[in-house]
Amino acid sequence: MKGITKKIPVVILAGGKGAPLGAASRVIPKPMIDINGKPLILYIIDHYIKYGFKKIIICTGLGSEMVERFVGSSDYLKRSGLDLSVVNTGPGNMTGSRIAQIRAKVNNADNFCVTYGDSVSDVNLARMLDFHISHGKIATLLGVHAPI
């Protein structure tokens, strides 16, 4: 599966106005909130790396400069071997607009993944991708109930 996943782009939506995640997210973007010494977005990236994904596109908006600064200064990300790009898709744009703006970066891929920059899970991404491909549909949506 890792041979396939390294060619599949992962789009992380990291700049919308979504619901606040406590007081910290009113000051910094949710993907940049520190959890146990590292920003939330790094947990997401690490999860995809675990399954062999190598192409990451981060769509930013609100707080774009914080995400860009983090990505540009992270030695860990530099050593990861990722094809990583940050695209400022504007602070007021919705999901569809953000994806449309990075269309050229995913156009040559048979499939691509999209996730929100505040969505961390332990989902087996290889099984999810197998499910998607085996059903031959245009999209597969993974939804979870947030623990409250």
Image (cartoon, helix red, strand yellow):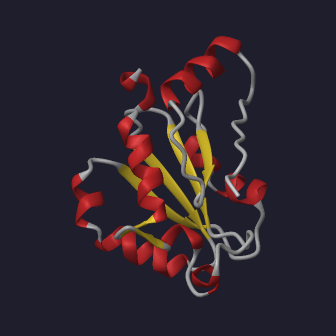
Q: Nearer the viewer, residue 148 or 81?
A: 148
Name which residue lies at 57% across and 82% down.
Answer: 24
Name which residue lies at 74% across and 57% down.
Answer: 95
Q: Position of residue 135 (x, y in %)?
A: 70, 14
Indicate whether 104 appears above or below 91. Answer: above
In the image, farthest residue toward the front: 148
Indicate whether 70 appears above or below 134. Answer: below
Q: Nearer the viewer, residue 128 or 106?
A: 128
Left or right side of 54 for 41 = right
Q: Position of residue 109 (x, y in %)?
A: 55, 32
Quarter of image, res 144: top right
Q: Nearer the viewer, residue 67 or 103?
A: 67
Indicate whether 120 appears above or below 54. Answer: below
Image quadrant in which the C terminus is located: bottom right
Left or right side of 122 for 107 = right
Name which residue lies at 63% across and 73% down.
Answer: 61
Image quadrant in which the N terminus is located: top left
